[in-house]
Image (cartoon, grey):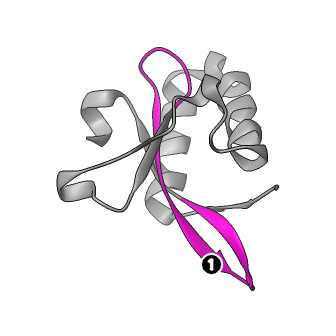
Amino acid sequence: MRRELLRSPAFARDLRSWLKSRPGVAGAIEATLEQLSEDASHPSLRTHKLRGSLAGCWACSAGYDLRFVFEFVQHEGAEAILLLALGTHDQVY
């Protein structure tokens, strides 16, 4: 089931900053977002539920030390993914 990806303002800001400082990772980010939209539980994403202050959120990997934090939400009558943050492990947790 393909889910629509919604970008929070914070995620959009993180993405712009990340791409500006590391333009070579654009393809990997795009591929990860496509895979997340297609199948959020695909093993290559290493998707996992978060705890503590981020309880209710999920995270997935887009490479060795790049993470996306997101939530599953309802949008226009269907389940969607709201992207909340992007960054290294230490930046997003």
Q: Amino acid at mark 1?
A: Gln
Task: From the top left corner, tell me how far across and down residue 32 is, in percent.
Answer: 67, 32
Q: Report if residue 56 lies within the magenta region.
A: no
Please identify the quadrant where the C terminus is shown: top left
In the depicted view, which residue is nearer to us: 82 or 40?
A: 40
Task: From the top left corner, tell me how far across and down residue 10 is, in percent.
Answer: 43, 58
Q: Main secondary structure of the magenta part?
A: strand
Assess disc 1: are there few (<14), some (14-19) or many (≥20) residues with their C-alpha within 10 Å of its C-alpha.
Answer: few
Please identify the quadrant where the N terminus is shown: bottom right
Q: Look at the image and give the residue range highlighted in magenta.
A: 61-82
Residue corresponding to mark 1: 74
Q: Residue at x 55, y 43 (%)?
A: 16
Q: Residue at x 68, y 27 (%)?
A: 26
Instruction: Identify the element where label 1 is drawn.
Output: strand
Q: Report if residue 70 lies within the magenta region.
A: yes
Quadrant for residue 56, please give it: bottom left
Q: Is residue 2 above or below residue 40?
A: below
Quick check: 49 left or right of 72? Answer: left
Task: From the top left corner, tell me how far across and down residue 15 is, in percent.
Answer: 54, 42
Quick check: 47 left or right of 55? Answer: right
Q: Residue at x 32, y 29 (%)?
A: 89
Quadrant for residue 82, please give it: bottom right
In the depicted view, which residue is nearer to us: 14 or 89?
A: 89
Q: Residue furthest left?
A: 52
All told, the count of numbered labels is 1
